[in-house]
Amino acid sequence: MPPKAKFTKAEIIEAALNIVRTDGYEALTSRALGTYLTSSARPIFTVFKNMEEVQQAMTQAAKALYKEYVEKGLAEEHPFKGVGTQYILFSVKEPKLFQLLFMTEQKQIPDLSGVLPLIDESYEQILLSIQDDYKISRPSAQKLYHHLWLYTHGIASLCATKMCRFTGQEISTMMTEVAMSILKKIKEDEKND
């Protein structure tokens, strides 16, 4: 009969998430997890086969937390701007998790059209919100999304690495100005086609 688990899967994942939140992904080791749980590392492996499984579960938990931010953004009056604002807010409130999810070197380098669906499970939902809110075609919505993601990711990266700080109003104004200028160009191009 296998030994009774001292900790639940959820408790171990939460502990792993908290270690990464505080000290970064590199700090997530079996020893650190045991210390956090005030135990040896042994009880962890009655629930998980190895640390790779723990890391995968913790990453899924981080993605689920980020998805809550996306959902909140999509519920705003202008969903695309809401998602962009929430993306930056996630980088401010959860800098280590943001770095894990959005600033980790990829094994293969995707092109711009492939990176957003790869890193964001809500890609299609966000794209549809752009089409609906701004009344533009799918290719135009993709173009706007790509431009604004590059801009928003830059702001978020500055925040996550504590290189720069912005007020909510500054973020809103910057995003609106850039979005409106790109949207104006897109609509001109659509009219001329």
Image (spheres, rainbow, N blue to C red):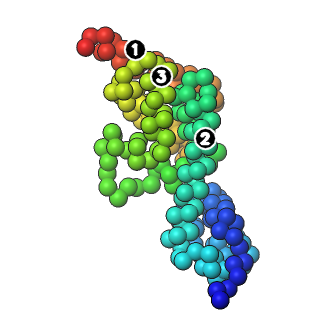
- Please tell me the numbered disc located at residue 2: none
Q: CA distance from mark 2 to mark 3?
A: 20 Å
Image quadrant for the C terminus?
top left
At x 36%, y 14%, the residue is 187
Q: Earlier in the sequence, mark 1 or mark 3?
A: 3
Q: Earlier in the sequence, mark 1 or mark 2?
A: 2
In the picture shown, does residue 14 fall above or below 83? below
**In front of the other: 192 or 128:** 128
Residue bearing the label numbered 1: 184
In the picture shown, does residue 116 fall above or below 23? above
Rate crowding at label 1 as few (under 14), some (14 to 19) or many (20 or more) other CA atoms within 10 Å.
few
User: Where is residue 162 shown, x and y percent of the image?
Assistant: 57, 45
In the picture shown, does residue 160 fall above or below 39? above
Query: Which amino acid does the dot numbered 2 rest on?
Result: Tyr
For numbered disc 1, what is the local secondary structure? helix
At x 74%, y 75%, the residue is 38
Residue bearing the label numbered 3: 132
Labels 1, 2: front one: 2
For numbered disc 2, what is the local secondary structure? helix
- In the image: residue 3, left or right of residue 155: right
**In front of the other: 105 or 66:** 66
- Please tell me the numbered disc located at residue 69: 2
At x 40%, y 19%, the residue is 136
In this view, the residue farthest toward the left is: 193
Q: CA distance from mark 1 to mark 3?
A: 16 Å
Give the image quarter of residue 172: top right
